Amino acid sequence: MSNSPLEGAQEIQGMLVDYAKQETVEPLKRLGRYLGLGVAGSLLMFLGALFVGLGALRLAQTFFTGSSFLSTVPYLISLTVLGLAMALIFLALGRAKRKVAPVTSDRI
């Protein structure tokens, strides 16, 4: 008998620790990386939308000046541009979701 019960228990403990790391720590690291990229992408998309809206507003303000009703037209134009951009993003997301095959789980 080369293995004593103490060595067997230590081996089981080592296997349990390795399994716990594999099933908890590593997926959490991947999730954190994925979440970080998602937050960074969301921030960049927000800044891009902000600058596009501001640019559309300033461009429209060069054509419509005055203190009458025409002074509100640039704001309506920039709102329309942002609305169209949002609609295009939602259409692209819907198209991307249809392309991805649904995930079926055989394991229950």
Image (tube, rainbow, N blue to C red):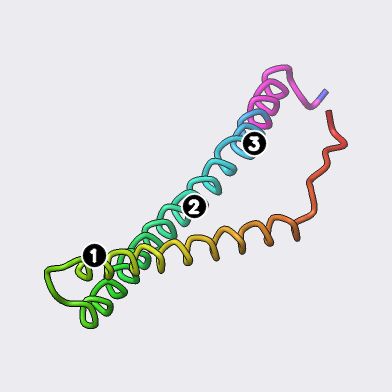
Q: Type of residue at label 3?
A: Glu
Q: Type of residue at label 1?
A: Thr
Q: Which residue is located at x 70 percent, y 25 percent?
A: 12
Helix, strand or loop at disc 2? helix
Whether 12 is among the magenta residues is yes
- The main secondary structure of the magenta stretch is helix
Q: In the rendered structure, which segment of residues is drawn in magenta?
A: 2-15
- Alpha carbon distance from label 3 to label 1: 57 Å
Q: Type of residue at label 2?
A: Arg
Instruction: Give left or right: position of 3 versus 64.
Output: right
Q: Which residue is located at x 79 percent, y 45 percent?
A: 103
Q: Which residue is mark 1?
A: 72
Picture coordinates of residue 30, whole percent (x, y): 55, 49
How dense is the environment of label 1, judged by Cα within 10 Å: few (below 14), some, or many (20 and up)? some
Q: Is residue 82 above or below residue 104?
A: below
Q: Residue furthest bottom?
A: 63
Q: Which residue is located at x 64 percent, y 31 percent?
A: 14
Q: Which residue is mark 3?
A: 23
The nearer-to-camera label among 3 and 1 is: 1
Picture coordinates of residue 64, whole percent (x, y): 22, 77
Q: Which mark is residue 37?
A: none
Q: Which residue is mark 2?
A: 33
